[in-house]
Image (tube, rainbow, N blue to C red):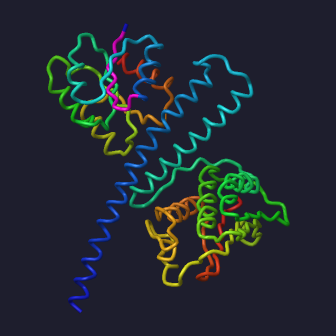
Amino acid sequence: MKKILIIEDDLFLQGLEASKLTKSGYEIITAKDGTEAMEKIQEPGIDLVLLDLILPDFNGFEIMKKIRETESVKNIPILVFSNLSEEKDVEQAKALGSVDFMVKSNFTLDELVMHIETALKK
Amino acid sequence: MHDDIEKLKEENTRLQKIIVVKSDLISITAHQLRTSLSAVKWILKMFADKDFGDINDEQKEYINKALTSSERMIAVVSNLLALNHADEPVVILEPEEVDIKMLIEDTVVEFYGETHKKNIVIEFQEPTCDIPAIQCDKDMIRVVLESIIENAIKYSNPKDKILITLKTNTENNTIIICIHDNGIGIKEEDKKHIFSKFFRAENAKKEGVTGSGLGLFITQNILQQHGGSISFESTENNGTTFFVTLPIS
């Protein structure tokens, strides 16, 4: 079973994402901020990170940089899932190696599952 | 002369800072709105997909209407963000054939609660000729109508009437929607700024009514993107009439 780390500070959205992905057959761990994210990312067997960009302590871009600088986890694919949508945000995420950038309000949770499946096949 | 130029430069710098602050506030607000709208959209879709159990046809119909409504709001927020950030404001349109008479009727119904509270009547006069369907982005034109009607209500007095008419202009192949109120009107010196971003007239602010100063800016941009236009006639304390023009073909 593939394992996904959801980094999302809105606990309601986090719960909805976790519920959907669990029902879709994934093992889910969650983090509500950057500090918790950098602890949980060390858990073995994480196949993908689902990352929000606006977080209470670090922003998503800082977390991406930290992940890319950590030898043990630097190759874990990161799918950015945010309500930021400006070109500069998409470009910055791409430059930091995100495999996909989805604007939450533009997609349903079924579509999120499809994008995750695609990301995991890469 | 030199002092006047320096004062103008300082005032310009101050106004630029205000625009940046307001723009940032809009971005933050839009992000918060999108967060809530994401949750609404996802849950409605889960209901529609029977993730929480079976639903009957009537429930499905209402859930789908709510889903459409939430997606419409998401599109409005996205366009607001696009207008807020772009140097040359661009609205993303999805044109379809629209019965504009029906759209006006539906939009007027939305304001029943507000008009009832303020004891204001909105009268939509039956057109005297057939109005052809037009190609337009229905949600964006609804935003235009809502913006103008909302202003008309805000700046009208209790027991006032707001009159809406719809007609065609066969000479230049357009439809014209007129929305007339008997409210506070627009001062002569404010008229040239009325479609500017963040502009709010002094007499509007004195009414104590809140506003972002973006409604007419967005409205004008939506209409221009459609190849249409907006103009107005107004006298202070004697009401305002907005004229919305849209091409028929």
Residue placed farthest to the bottom in the image?
B1
Residue at (58, 30) in percent of width and height? B44
The quadrant where residue A103 appears = top left
Left or right of residue A45: residue B65: right
- Work out which quarter of the rendered image holds the N terminus of chain A and state it: top left
Image location of residue B9, percent across then percent down? 25, 78
Residue at (43, 14) in percent of width and height? A22
Residue at (19, 27) in percent of width and height? A68
User: Count the marks: how many?
Assistant: 0
Image location of residue B181, percent across then percent down? 67, 72
* Viewer-nearest residue: A19 or B72: A19
Please say if A2 is above or below A77: above
* Viewer-nearest residue: B116 or B204: B116
- Work out which quarter of the rendered image holds the C terminus of chain A and state it: top left
Does the stretch in magenta take in A8?
yes
State which region is magenta.
A2-11
Left or right of residue A118: residue A59: left
Please say if A80 is above or below B117: above
Does the stretch in magenta take in A103?
no
Image location of residue B220, percent across then percent down? 54, 65
Residue at (36, 11) in percent of width and height? A2
Image location of residue A90, percent across then percent down? 33, 39
The quadrant where residue B31 appears = top left
